[in-house]
């Protein structure tokens, strides 16, 4: 995510065919945390999980098919209450835009204000919401919910915002414990680290595509 990188703002509704097509084969903010996982030795920058994620992006490009969604009930639950959470935040929040970084990264914040992005989590299991209630700082968010932290850092950069609202919402809870809001500032050092990982992952993806194309040509597939 260098200074010369082109970030495109897209007016596409999330979870539509157009949205799936726009993010096909790209590293997404929701999965950015995988690329931040180190390998077991100095010779391996990425963890096995990260390498699998890179190969997943290769598969999307070759097949032209988006990855299958898992845990459908949990996803459906979260999406059904996002708008309710936005309305309860106490100030106007627009539904987030989509952002594409060049041809290899993609992010979709759940909401935006003039100064912040908004990431809303509605845990299917109430235990997850209770654990979110106990988070006291962005550092604890990084340590205990790295997937949320790195998602917000990437989306803040893509949207050009300097801060984010992390929101956890569970309508089953009593009123005083139904919603948590935490402000998370952008961490430019972490964004820089993520940028390096994204660029390296993209280089590996391109190399895999070349190698696979050559292998198929040799085999006359």
Image (tube, grey):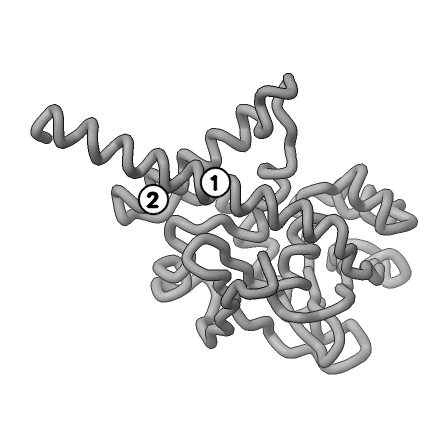
Give the SS element for disc 2. helix
In this orientation, which residue lies closer to the viewer: 119 or 101? 101
Q: Residue at x 67, y 73 (%)?
A: 112
Image location of residue 98, percent across then percent down: 51, 68
The residues tagged by marks 1 and 2 sit, at their Cα atoms, a distance apart of: 16 Å
Question: Which residue is identified by label 1?
Answer: 70
**How many numbered circles does the render carry?**
2
Tell me the quarter of the picture where residue 167 sits.
Answer: bottom right
Above or below, 161 against 166 in this view is below
Q: Is residue 17 left or right of residue 34?
A: left
The answer to which of marks 1 and 2 sits earlier in the sequence is 2
Instruction: Find disc 2 in the rendering and name its residue.
Output: 60
Query: Which numbered tag is attached to residue 115?
Result: none
Image vertical order of residue 5 relative to residue 62, above or below: below
Q: Position of residue 97 (x, y in %)?
A: 55, 72
Q: Nearer the viewer, residue 200 or 177?
A: 200
Q: Residue placed at 68% from the left, 45% from the top?
A: 193
Q: Is the N terminus in the top left, top right, bottom left or bottom right quadrant?
A: bottom right
Task: Report the front residue among 197 and 113.
Answer: 197
- Mark 2 Cα shell of 10 Å, populated few (<14), some (14-19), many (≥20): some
Q: Quadrant of the C terminus?
A: top left
Dot 1, how many residues are within 10 Å of its Cα: few (below 14), some (14-19), or many (20+)?
few
Q: Marks 2 and 1: in contact by CB < 8 Å?
A: no
Residue at x 11% of width, y 24% of height: 219
Q: Residue furthest left?
A: 220
**What residue sits 72% from the left and 80% below the top?**
114
Determine whether the residue tagged by mark 1 lies in a helix, strand or loop.
loop
Residue 213 appears at what percent x and percent y?
22, 35
């Amino acid at each position: 995510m260098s200074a010369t990188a082109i970030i495109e703002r897209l007016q596409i509704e999330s979870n539509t065919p157009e949205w799936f097509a726009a993010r096909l084969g790209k590293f997404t903010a929701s999965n950015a945390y995988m690329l931040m996982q180190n390998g077991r030795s100095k010779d391996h920058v990425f963890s096995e999980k990260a390498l699998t994620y890179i190969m997943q992006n290769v598969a999307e490009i070759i097949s032209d098919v988006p990855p299958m969604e898992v845990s459908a009930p949990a996803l459906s639950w979260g999406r059904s209450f996002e708008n309710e959470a936005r309305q309860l935040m106490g100030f106007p929040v627009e539904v987030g835009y989509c952002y594409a970084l060049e041809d290899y990264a993609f992010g979709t914040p759940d909401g935006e204000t003039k100064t912040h992005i908004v990431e809303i989590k509605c845990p299917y299991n109430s235990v997850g919401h209770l654990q979110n209630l106990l988070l006291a700082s962005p550092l604890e968010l990084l340590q205990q919910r790295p997937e949320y932290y790195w998602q917000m850092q990437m989306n803040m950069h893509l949207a050009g915002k300097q801060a984010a609202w992390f929101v956890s919402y569970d309508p089953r809870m009593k009123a005083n414990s139904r919603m948590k809001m935490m402000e998370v500032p952008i961490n430019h050092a972490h964004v820089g680290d993520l940028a390096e990982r994204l660029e390296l992952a993209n280089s590996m993806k391109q190399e895999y595509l070349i190698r696979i194309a050559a292998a198929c040509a040799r085999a006359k597939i």
